[in-house]
Image (tube, grey):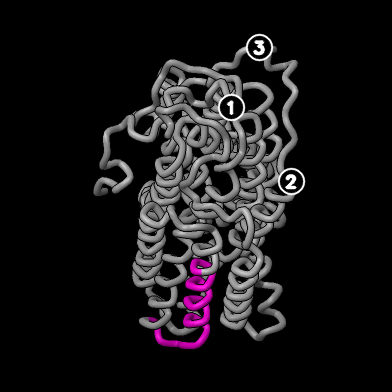
């Protein structure tokens, strides 16, 4: 992968030597984050993607392996989707732990537990116990995602924070394509084989232990810390928009193959190629966000939702695979910009003692939206005559949400890469 524009500067530019300045939060550290810390946090962020897509190619094999288990046709797909639901339900609680106790300690523990629970299906013999292990993987992923995103917010500020949150989306998108390929290749030797990849979290925890740090705090111990209230109104708006954004983001990821099959595309190779093209468009959108982060949410969000809406309506309006591909590319580019916009909008103006909880709430909203996407489209499709009709309704809803955001965000609408709204050190400016 070519080097992202976000990295084409000295590694300490935009880093905050005093991660949270004493004037702002009462915290101090003598370390300066660099490229190594960024790589470790991005690698940790990819583990939720690993959990979401790695075993997708072997689900048919798993279904055949558990033919004798009642309800296997329903339970096997849940093995894939259960972690996403658990991330959505538990990430807010992980955020409380992150703010109340320790970011780094929770991250390392979650990484080690992820390796244990992720590889458990290698030796578990019943579908019920495998499903239970996947639930525990989801708990770990919620903690890992919350910690990694929070530490990115702690270690960097301003334009660099915005670019690195965009880079987080970019890396996750590209890793999804890689993990799908690895899952398919490893699955050729048996449905259990891909689960070995979950063990990567254990060795990754070693450099995290050595090279990441918890911003130190003066004064009272963590257990006695009184956490400031969250700006609930601000977070409620951003999380509700993110919940809907998660549905828009995940809609074609889940349903594009079914749309193509319905219009006569039967080659799995062709479907895979078109899906990969959409994935690359999503990555391109994440790159574009890094160049547009100086814009305000009122400017970016309507554009991103509008572009996604146009793409979904194009997919609805045609049966030609080439035009469907064009619509998928438009939607992918729009959602690739949308995710980093949403997370930056939600957490960049939170204080150090609010950031973990805010990040957890945002992560929970996103993953609940992703989990709800196929359910929502199935429900809408039952009333519109099919999947493409459901995508049209989602496209129209996306356009409406974009318009409402443009009307509603009139006050306090600051650039996404601007200052945090609190005093900062000269190095951070």
With 43 as the anchor, is 312 left or right in this view? right
Main secondary structure along the magenta-highlighted residues: helix
Residue that appears at 45% across and 59% down: 337
**Quick check: marks 1 and 2 in contact, CB under 8 Å?**
no
Q: Where does the magenta region start and end?
A: 303-321
Image spot of residue 229 (x, y percent)? 75, 35
Sequence-first tag of 3 and 1? 1
Residue that appears at 69% across and 12% down: 220
Q: Element type at marker 1?
A: helix
Please tell me whether mark 1 or mark 2 is closer to you in this view. Answer: 1
> Which label belongs to residue 24?
1
With 400 as the anchor, is 325 left or right in this view? left
Q: Is residue 207 above or below residue 55?
A: above
Whether residue 132 is visible, yes or no, is: yes
- Residue 400 image-quadrant placement: bottom right
Tell me the quarter of the image containing the C terminus: top left
Image spot of residue 263 (x, y percent)? 47, 84
> Which label belongs to residue 334?
none
> Which label belongs to residue 219?
3
Sequence-first tag of 2 and 3? 3
Q: Element type at marker 3?
A: loop
Q: Is residue 335 above or below residue 264?
A: above
Residue that appears at 68% across and 57% down: 240
Alpha carbon separation for disc pair 2 and 3? 27 Å
Q: Is residue 259 above or below residue 123?
A: below
Magenta span contains residue 372 = no
Q: Which residue is mark 2?
A: 232
């Amino acid at each position: 992968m070519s080097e992202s524009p976000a990295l084409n500067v000295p590694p300490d530019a935009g880093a905050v030597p005093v991660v949270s300045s004493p004037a702002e939060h009462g915290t101090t550290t003598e370390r300066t984050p660099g490229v190594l810390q960024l790589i470790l946090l991005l690698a940790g962020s990819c583990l939720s993607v690993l959990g979401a897509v790695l075993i997708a190619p072997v689900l048919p094999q798993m279904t055949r392996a558990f033919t004798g288990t009642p309800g296997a046709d329903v339970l096997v797909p849940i093995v894939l989707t259960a972690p996403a639901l658990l991330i959505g339900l538990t990430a807010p609680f992980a955020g409380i732990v992150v703010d109340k106790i320790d970011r780094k300690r929770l991250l390392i523990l979650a990484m080690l537990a992820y390796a244990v629970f992720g590889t458990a299906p290698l030796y578990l013999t019943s579908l019920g116990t495998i499903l239970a292990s996947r639930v525990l993987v989801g708990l770990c992923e919620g903690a890992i995602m919350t910690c990694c995103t929070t530490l990115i917010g702690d270690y960097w500020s301003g334009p660099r924070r915005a670019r690195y949150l965009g880079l987080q989306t970019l890396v996750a998108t590209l890793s999804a394509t890689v993990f799908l390929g690895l899952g398919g290749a490893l699955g050729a030797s048996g449905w259990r084989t891909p689960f070995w990849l979950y063990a990567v979290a254990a060795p990754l925890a070693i450099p995290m232990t050595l090279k990441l740090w918890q911003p130190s705090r003066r004064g009272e111990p963590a257990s006695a810390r009184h956490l400031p209230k969250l700006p609930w109104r601000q977070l409620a708006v951003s999380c509700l928009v993110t919940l809907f954004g998660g549905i828009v983001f995940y809609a074609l990821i889940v349903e594009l193959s079914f749309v193509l099959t319905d219009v006569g595309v039967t080659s799995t190779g062709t479907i895979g190629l078109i899906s990969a093209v959409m994935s690359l468009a999503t990555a391109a959108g994440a790159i574009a966000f890094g160049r547009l982060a100086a814009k305000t949410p009122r400017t970016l969000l309507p554009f991103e939702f509008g572009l996604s809406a146009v793409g979904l309506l194009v997919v609805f309006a045609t049966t030609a695979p080439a035009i469907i591909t064009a619509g998928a590319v438009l939607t992918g580019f729009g959602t690739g910009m949308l995710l980093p916009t949403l997370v930056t909008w939600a957490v960049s103006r939170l204080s150090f003692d609010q950031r973990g909880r805010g990040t957890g709430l945002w992560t929970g909203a996103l993953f609940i939206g992703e989990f709800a996407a196929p359910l929502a489209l199935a429900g809408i499709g039952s009333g519109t005559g099919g999947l493409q009709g459901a995508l049209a309704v989602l496209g129209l809803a996306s356009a409406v949400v974009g318009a409402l955001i443009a009307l509603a965000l009139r006050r306090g609408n600051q650039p996404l890469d601007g200052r945090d709204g609190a005093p900062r050190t000269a190095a951070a400016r």
